Image (tube, helix red, strand yellow):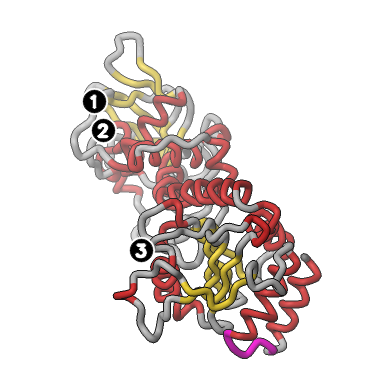
Amino acid sequence: MKEVIESVRKMLNDGLFLDEQHVRYSLVGRICHKLGWNIWNPAEFYTEYPVKKYPPQEVTTELRGRVDIALFLADKRTDKAEVFIEVKSPGKLQYELPSGEAQLQRYNYWDKAAICILTDGITWRFYLPSEGGSFDSTLFNEFHILNDNVDVICQTLDKVLRRENFRKQAVQTASDMYEELGKIRLINKVKQKAAQIASDTGMDIYLLAKQLIIQTEHTDLDIEEIVELWDRTLPSGSTPIPPPPPPPPSHKEHTTYTPSGDRVPIFISKKSVKANGFYDPHTKGTVICKGSEIVMNHSESFDGAYLVAKEQMIRSGILYLNSTRDKYILRQDVTFKSPSAASRLVLGRSSNGFTDWLDDQGKPLDYHRIKH
């Protein structure tokens, strides 16, 4: 299969595939042949397959109610297609994706094929109609034949399109891929927020992502799954997620902070809590030192990302209750990207760190802010 993909790549780059018919026979047909389908038997490799139960009132000149390629297990004597493949001219799928998905959804209106494929020879998108719902939501995999890793392309085709895997094994593999893609979507939803909280608090980014998924999506993923799928991207047809900032060091890397240079010792003493730390006027980085007190109860304004971070600190043991169980104690130094983020945790409410933190002379931290 690897040789076939590399050959197809060269022909695509040389501009030899000019239209839909070239893609259908010389590209898709060639790949299907390599995967064990008898492309010479029209009962197995059925082109222009008329969908028998296509709603007649919806048939138009444009749609015609015919699938470009339908794959059958000819020796099984069944009238149910294993695969529907809708083909577009090279490079056209990006413009015809919605209409192509609409075609396949109509073709599956009554009798669902096990797996559906939408391709222009370059981009290949795989769907599992049995998942139900809108057709675009049944996408379970995608690859770009020119840009993606050849071994990954070959593995995907071998798992979900090889004839001998139909129908049970291919559908099970597709279902597993669909479930995994769903997890990737969940992770991508919380990536940016997890990275932001981790940057503010020094918390482990993967633990934060886990808690955000539980809180916002009511789903629990194992940390191992989150780590494994963290860098996996969504198919290009999916809603793009802005890239998160680079993950900060894990909280495990924090050690007792030693001030140096012009770092400013700071403290808070209010609301029955006392906290101390250090502020860097150049970076605005703020450290709350080990042993500082954190309020147990917080206001309604202490919500969202800050609440998630505090709950995660409690679960991981970074915050623990004191002997009278009326406040939390910080077990280790924690770094924040701003004094306000740090004082917000200490006080459990909205806070201006430049007024709530004081230096060792009792002056507000704003006194040490570098004015630009």
**Which residue carries the number 1 mark?**
297
Q: Secondary structure at mark 3?
A: loop
In-front residue for pair 34/328: 34
Compared with 86, 352 (above or below) is above
The image position of residue 253, as x and y in percent, is 58, 35
In-front residue for pair 181/85: 85
Q: Is residue 286 visible?
A: no
Compared with 84, 230 (above or below) is above
The image position of residue 245, as x and y in percent, is 48, 55
In-front residue for pair 51/30: 51
Mark closest to the chain's N terminus, 1 or 2: 1
Name the kind of residue labelled 3 in the image: His
Question: Who's the residue at 40% across and 84% down the image?
Answer: 62
List the single residue furthest toward the front. 77
List the single residue furthest toward the right. 3
| Separation of marks 3 and 2 at Cα, in angstroms | 30 Å
**Which residue carries the number 3 mark?**
372
Picture disc at residue 43: none
The image position of residue 367, as x and y in percent, is 30, 48
Q: Which residues are magenta?
A: 16-20
Pointer 1 and pointer 2: residues touching (CB < 8 Å)? Answer: yes
Q: Quadrant of the C terminus?
A: bottom left
Q: Secondary structure at mark 2?
A: loop
Mark closest to the chain's N terminus, 3 or 2: 2
Question: Who's the residue at 61% across and 76% down the image?
Answer: 121
**Which residue carries the number 2 mark?**
348
